[in-house]
Image (cartoon, rainbow, N blue to C red):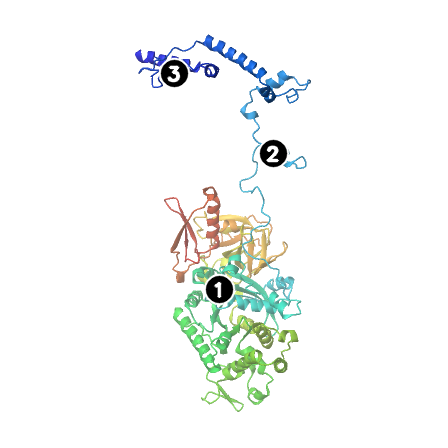
């Protein structure tokens, strides 16, 4: 109770203090000084309990009367002071209120209460942008979360596109691969270590087959020349190395003039991307091993050779960058020959040690499975193709009359000498035939182009059948002049096509060993027999082996790259997609999809097959619209309810064994498992779904890439190495 009384007393004191108006204080200051001002300022006005104990205060009535008196005295002083009258506002300066405005309404509007939702904090769109700009205000955000508010002006491209114009039309190529005999079809993977010149070698082949540019000057042709055409990804061009395998299907003629439909697959050379090479080897029938003439056999070469030998593929070797022995090392022709012999012998030793029985076919230039090339200077040759230049040579009239060109080509390698019109194996003071008939002419061509005058160069080359224009001879770039001269001297790369035709089996012949190694089903079933014969008949079941998903231009979808073992396929077919975990007892890893497009791969472009045309067995195709059902590899067959195809055979009938899958790929040379781990997280946590979708695409695109979510919740990506990640 005492506390309550104290509080009430304190509140009453506060109210008393608030009741003192400024007018009363001004009145006291205008009059005599307050009695308290004359007293001791140190005098206490309140006691220890907060009670006022000072002098008596005037009452409210006295304060009002004093204020009114003060006001009257102020008015009287203003009237007597003319200077003060000038400072007061005059009638002319006063605010004039029109008579038509209701002052009471204006005062009421100013004093009106405005609700929070009715307040205007910012100017309207019309006031900001003007009446000529149309503005739209949406109360709700009706746009999808995936749709940006402002669409980008250009779509981000992951891979490159280029409309390559070849000498042979696309219609002719489609008719060529439609041949049911498959004798005009071959598929070869070009493998090798990093930087050996695989992509440059394929550029040289493309340059020979495309329509030459219309430029009349060497400078313009230098701009139009293909450079790393098989590197289709933007990051491949930026990094200067191949990351993904790139298939190119080209019509290539052999030495007899017959055209074949060849599918060449440019494989990465970096050891981190060894899994990409294995994907290509699983679909190919032959392997072309590229070896640098200067560096020789490296670890990357050993890995791909062991993988190719383990799959039982036909091997061939191309010794690239032959120009480095001449221009960089500046070896004499005899030493250059010894260097080439050492590379061939080392490759044979590697092949025999990698094969289980040690009975793999030997590589030798006399057999036609060893080639020599310089992609930078635009030429390649074999012993047989170089021997064609000596067919009409007068020096060999006596010796070649007893030898055919094939026999003469075999004399151009090994410890064989030519003296006085005869070939012999006795050691002689003269050089070996490979040095005398092949290396020395090449050395002389280099010396002629780089060191002699224009007139002598033109005269000498005209004798050899090489005709160059004056603008080409006066080219300031010696590399381009060498390329023009040597490419015309050697002609087209028919030696490579001859090797593929002679040593690489056709799809029908190569089907049996590949099916024995990779197919998990019985070889006595109707499906297996159709695959062994590579049948494209209407009654043959469709079987397609998919090993690689190639990214589209915008990176939003994939094209499935595979080989047709049996039957035929066309756009609009409904197919069964059997994943790597599919079995006869457990069909969980089975799905259905509709093929939206079928095309023939050609590097940066695809040759689309019409909706009314079907692609038969023995071909390598790109299939669109089925990538959503494929994780790594898959086996395709037609669905039972498919009515848009000619393959009416029911492969899953009770009388026949159902289709089984092809074995998943293994990578023994790379350890069969990715060992380098990288934890990833989005910079913006709201974009976590986008990151998860990106990791899923990475897992589909890279064979040995794996993604995992740890118990802690972080997302982990596994790869083969630092460059891989």
User: Which residue lies at the image location 62% right of the left edge and 16% below the top edge?
Assistant: 104
- Of the 4 image quadrants, the one containing the N terminus is top left
Question: Which comes sooner in the sequence, label 3 or label 1?
Answer: 3
Residue that label 3 marks: 38
Q: Is residue 260 visible?
A: no
Circle nearer the viewer, 3 or 2: 3
Which image quarter: residue 646? bottom right
Is residue 164 something that shows in the picture?
yes
Considering the numbered disc 3 on the image, is that residue within a helix, a strand or a loop? helix
Report crowding for label 1: few under 14, some 14 to 19, many 20 or more residues within 10 A (C-alpha). some
Residue 106 percent location from the top left of the image:
62, 19
- Camera-nearest residue between 710 and 68: 68
Locate the C terminus and report the quarter of the image it occupies. bottom left
661 sits to left or right of 616:
left
Q: Nearer the viewer, mark 3 or mark 1?
A: 3
The residues bearing labels 1 and 2 have C-alpha atoms spaced at a distance of 69 Å
Give residue 685's position: percent from left, percent from top: 45, 42
Image mark for residue 512: 1
Q: Which residue is mark 2?
A: 137
């Amino acid at each position: 109770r005492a506390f309550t009384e104290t509080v009430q007393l304190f509140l009453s004191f506060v109210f008393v203090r608030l009741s003192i108006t400024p007018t009363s204080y001004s009145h006291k200051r205008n009059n005599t000084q307050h009695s308290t001002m004359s007293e001791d300022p140190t005098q206490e006005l309140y006691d220890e309990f907060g009670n006022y104990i000072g002098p008596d205060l005037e009452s409210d009535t006295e304060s009002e009367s004093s204020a009114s008196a003060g006001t009257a005295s102020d008015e009287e002083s203003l009237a007597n002071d003319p200077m003060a009258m000038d400072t007061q506002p005059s009638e002319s300066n006063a605010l004039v209120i029109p008579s038509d405005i209701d002052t009471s309404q204006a005062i009421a509007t100013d004093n009106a209460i405005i609700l929070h939702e009715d307040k205007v904090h910012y100017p309207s769109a019309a006031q900001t942008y003007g009446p000529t700009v149309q503005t739209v205000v949406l109360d709700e955000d009706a746009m999808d979360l995936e749709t940006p508010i402002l669409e980008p002006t250009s779509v981000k491209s992951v891979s490159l596109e280029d409309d390559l114009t070849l000498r042979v039309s696309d219609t002719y190529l489609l008719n060529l691969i439609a041949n049911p005999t498959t004798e005009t079809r071959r598929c070869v993977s070009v493998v090798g270590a990093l930087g050996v010149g695989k992509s440059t070698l394929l550029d040289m082949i493309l340059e020979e087959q495309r329509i030459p540019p219309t430029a009349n000057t060497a400078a313009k042709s230098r701009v139009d020349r293909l450079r790393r055409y098989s590197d289709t990804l933007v990051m491949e061009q930026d990094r200067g190395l191949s990351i993904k395998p790139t298939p190119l299907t080209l019509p290539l003629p052999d030495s007899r003039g017959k055209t074949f439909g060849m599918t060449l697959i440019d494989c990465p050379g970096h050891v981190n991307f060894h899994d990409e090479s294995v994907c290509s080897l699983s679909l190919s029938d032959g392997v072309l091993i590229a070896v640098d003439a200067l560096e020789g056999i490296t670890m990357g070469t050993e890995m791909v050779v062991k993988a190719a030998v383990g799959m039982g593929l036909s091997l061939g070797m191309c010794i690239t960058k032959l120009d480095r022995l001449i221009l960089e090392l500046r070896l004499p022709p005899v030493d250059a020959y010894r260097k080439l012999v050492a590379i061939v012998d080392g490759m044979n030793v590697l092949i025999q040690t990698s094969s289980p029985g040690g009975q793999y076919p030997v590589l030798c230039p006399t057999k036609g499975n060893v080639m020599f090339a310089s992609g930078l200077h635009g030429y390649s040759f074999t012993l047989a193709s170089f021997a064609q230049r000596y067919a009409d040579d007068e020096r060999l009239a006596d010796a070649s009359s007893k030898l055919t060109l094939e026999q003469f080509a075999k004399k151009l390698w090994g410890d064989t000498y030519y003296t006085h019109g005869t070939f012999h194996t006795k050691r002689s003071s003269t050089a070996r035939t490979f040095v005398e008939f092949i290396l020395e002419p090449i050395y002389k061509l280099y010396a002629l182009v780089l060191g002699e005058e224009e007139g002598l160069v033109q005269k000498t080359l005209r004798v050899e059948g090489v005709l160059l224009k004056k603008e080409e001879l006066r080219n300031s770039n010696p590399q381009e002049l060498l390329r023009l001269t040597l490419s015309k001297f050697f002609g087209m790369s028919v030696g490579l096509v001859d090797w593929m035709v002679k040593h690489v089996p056709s799809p029908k012949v190569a089907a049996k060993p590949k099916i024995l190694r990779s197919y998990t089903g019985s070889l006595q079933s109707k499906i297996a027999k159709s695959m062994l014969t590579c049948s494209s008949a209407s009654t043959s079941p469709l079987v397609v082996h998919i090993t690689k998903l190639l990214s589209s231009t915008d990176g939003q979808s994939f094209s499935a790259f595979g080989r047709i073992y049996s039957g035929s396929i066309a756009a609009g077919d409904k197919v069964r997609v059997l994943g790597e975990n599919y079995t006869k007892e457990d069909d969980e890893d089975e799905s259905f999809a509709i093929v939206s497009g079928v095309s023939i791969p050609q590097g940066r472009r695809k040759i689309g097959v019409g909706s009314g045309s079907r692609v038969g067995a023995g071909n390598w195709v790109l299939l669109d619209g089925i990538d959503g059902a494929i994780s790594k590899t898959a086996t395709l067959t037609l669905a039972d309810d498919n009515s848009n195809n000619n393959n009416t055979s029911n492969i899953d009938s009770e009388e026949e064994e159902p289709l089984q899958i092809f074995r998943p790929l293994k990578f023994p040379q790379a350890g069969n498992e990715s060992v380098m781990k990288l934890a990833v997280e989005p910079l913006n946590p709201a974009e976590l779904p986008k990151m998860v979708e990106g990791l899923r695409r990475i897992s589909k695109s890279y064979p040995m890439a794996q993604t995992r979510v740890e118990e802690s919740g972080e997302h982990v990506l596994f790869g083969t190495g630092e460059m891989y990640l």
